[in-house]
Amino acid sequence: MKIGILTQPLHKNYGGILQNYALQKVLKDMGHEVWTIDRNFNSPPYRKYASIIKRMLLKPFNRNAPIRVWPTKKEEEIITQYIRAFIKNNIQTTEKITSTKQLKRLHKKYAFDAYIVGSDQVWRPRYSPCLTNYFLDFLENDHNVKKIAYAASFGVDEWEFTQEQTKECARLAKQFHAISVREDSGIELCKKYLGVDAVHLLDPTLLLNKEDYLSLINNASTTPSKGNLFVYILDKDEKKTNIVNEVAKYRNLTPFELLPKQFLIEANKSEIEKCIYPPIEQWLRAFVDAEFIITDSFHGTIFSIIFEKPFLVIGNKKRGISRFNSLLDLLNLRQRKIDEVENIDSSILKGKIDDDRIDSLINHLRKKSILFLSKSLS
């Protein structure tokens, strides 16, 4: 079967790229021909202008502050060079598209037998380039194509759709052949607001095992990590820094990060090389080399589990807390999520995770998830 995967744009999000890689690999291993639709994300012009205005207002207070906050095409190519190389070598993509009209043309060109929407927060309005596209509005009059949602995520446990979006997406959701969601709260959201039934399944990254990711590392050129406490924090603040320092001191570990040395908003044009995102394979190696991991990232949490490392999750409400709670509750690991340094239980820092129990749970859920895909595509 020829399958098109519709997920969030493959940009600079390690977890978002790896979940797409994992889903495509599983489907290919099942014998299907699989393509990921290379959807581009065009931010609304007002966001760009608002950012520029903000920088200009701050400029008088810092003469060296760069006003430019959006990279040119050439700068973007420099910043994402390793990420683009990973995608080119490991994910089969279509040509890049940016609109519903182009999606319709792409469908005629590729003649997919099925579309799979997912995973990541494809059903969260603020993150999706065009929400109704992720409910396959461009296939409305094509009844011969299978429409499947695999581990689709709303990201949060409250409803964020407008009244108009709810009405339209509910109508489109009823045309799906099978729907699964990534968070347990998504089952109730689908039932209450979309009027459809859904099942709770694993994020695609968990459909592969540790050895699958180790093979990616082994096939690439990586270097030893510069520490043994991997800190993967997406939204830094003083509270999180205090937690890192406390854990490093308690366990006598050396913290290290794996992010660009600078972000574009901080850099002048001459410093663009400092904004390069490290290779995805090096990011994976960071989990292997670490003795302990601290993260506020959903996929940072998942890969801590995959590589069987003790970890702490710092709640990240900005990016959607329900997905953290759902994952940790599913594996009975909620005690590893904290919000304040005072809440750290020393027994968590000392204790190991029962990897055999976790492996057993994941293997059971993995079989259930793959069976869903197999039945939905049959």
Image (tube, grey):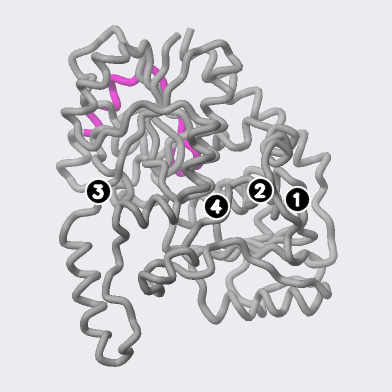
Residue at 39 percent across and 44 percent down: it is: 154
Residue at 39 percent across and 35 percent down: it is: 7
In the structure shown, which secondary structural element does the residue marked by tag 4 occupy?
helix
- Residue 144 position by quadrant: top left
Query: From where the camera sits, is residue 362 visible?
Result: no
User: Mark 1 sits on what residue?
Assistant: 288
Residue 42 circle label: 3
User: Mark 4 sits on what residue?
Assistant: 298
Kind of residue at disc 2: Leu
Magenta span of residues: 169-186
Say if mark 3 contacts mark 1, CB within 8 Å: no
Say if mark 2 contacts mark 1, CB within 8 Å: yes
The foreground one among 227 and 239 is: 227
Kind of residue at disc 1: Val
Q: Residues within 10 Å of mark 1 (few under 14, many from 20)?
A: many
The foreground one among 290 and 200 is: 290
**Residue 167, how many percent across, how many down?**
18, 36
Kind of residue at disc 4: Phe
In the structure shown, which secondary structural element does the residue marked by tag 1 occupy?
helix
Tell whether position 175 is magenta: yes
Instruction: Compute the Cα span from label 1 to label 4.
Output: 17 Å
Residue at 76 percent across and 37 percent down: it is: 359
Kind of residue at disc 3: Asn
- The answer to whether residue 58 is left or right of residue 189 is left
In the structure shown, which secondary structural element does the residue marked by tag 2 occupy?
helix
Instruction: Compute the Cα span from label 4 to label 3.
Output: 24 Å
User: Mark 2 sits on what residue?
Assistant: 284
Of pointers 1 and 4, the one earlier in the residue sequence:
1
Say if mark 1 contacts mark 4, CB within 8 Å: no
Instruction: Compute the Cα span from label 2 to label 1.
Output: 7 Å
